[in-house]
Amino acid sequence: MNGVEIITAAAVIGIIGLLVGLLLGVAAKAFAVEVDEKEILVREQLPGNNCGGCGYAGCDALAKAIAQGEASVDACPVGGDPVGKAIAKIMGVTAGDKEREVAFVKCAGTCDKAETKYNYYGIYDCKKLALIPGNGDKACSYGCMGYGSCVRACPFDAIHVINGIAKVDKEKCKACGKCIAECPKHLIELVPYKAKHVVQCSSQDKGKAVKDVCSTGCIGCGLCVKQCEFDAISVENNIAHIDQSKCTGCGKCAEKCPSHVIV
């Protein structure tokens, strides 16, 4: 191969490369997907857990929704108030102070307090066990079954079954809501992190029926209601409920509760 052929080959390759580069450049502009700069900045602030606690399919979807004004700047339960304020600054809005919430299991029926109907040997899955007549092996049909579906659902290792019932670690809980969605008996709810008192029972049975199956169940006696000076507690369907927006944490309801179910 002489020098002319080498130069010709190099020129042909160079021209082809130039044409390919131009075509790629044109294609990049023609098929470019526009991304809102704010969406990118918001996504950088989100923790990346993709837990779905915000109601969107992961952090990318939430970032897009916030950038488009479809979601509030403090919608991420994992990031909490600090992330909400950082995103608010990006969006040019003011973020209000959002009170931290944590999951709470409304059952105190531990192994030593709750009666059982039979010994269960099978799959440790609350949803499957709930399909069995009687809603599980515990005599109280409203109580925590303790088979850990909520534990497996939690991406933050914030809930564990201790002595037969699920317990939430307040310091680890991010209020993502996955345990709430997983519980077939709807025993888990979000309460303020700073809540002074909560009712650790969900039974809707009446007094004697409650005590026959659990020594620590709410009997709906109403003593707590009479003690509260702030109209913060009521009894509905034989179970006490505390309005956390009214509760001052005085503790009088807990002192008078004969079942010691207000903690």
Image: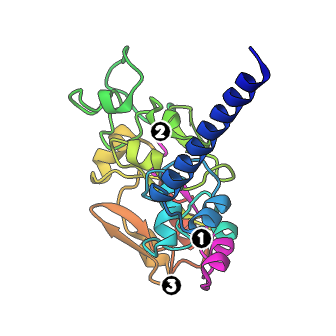
Task: Categorize mark 3 by other alpha carbons within 10 Å: few (<14), some (14-19), many (20+).
Answer: few
Task: Work out whether residue 96 or residue 110 is closer to the camera in this orientation and state it.
Answer: 96
| Number of numbered labels in the structure image | 3
- Seen in the image, is 42 located left or right of residue 104? right
Q: Quadrant of residue 59?
A: bottom right
Query: Which stretch did the figure color magenta?
Result: 84-109
Q: Which mark is residue 150?
A: 2
Q: Is residue 188 above or below residue 10?
A: below
Q: Residue at x 60, y 85 (%)?
A: 93
Amino acid type at circle 1 is Lys
Q: Residue furthest left?
A: 133
Q: Which mark is residue 28?
A: none
- Seen in the image, is 131 located left or right of residue 63? left
Q: Residue at x 49, y 57 (%)?
A: 32
Answer whether labels 2 and 1 touch (C-beta < 8 Å).
Answer: no
The residue at which mark 3 appears reads as 229
Q: Residue at x 57, y 44 (%)?
A: 19
Q: How much space separates mark 2 and mark 1, taking CA atoms?
A: 35 Å
Task: Work out whether residue 194 or residue 208 is closer to the camera in this orientation and state it.
Answer: 194
Where residue 7 appears, as percent x and y from the top left, is 74, 29
The residue at which mark 1 appears reads as 38
Dot in front, 2 or 3: 2
Secondary structure under tag 3 reads loop
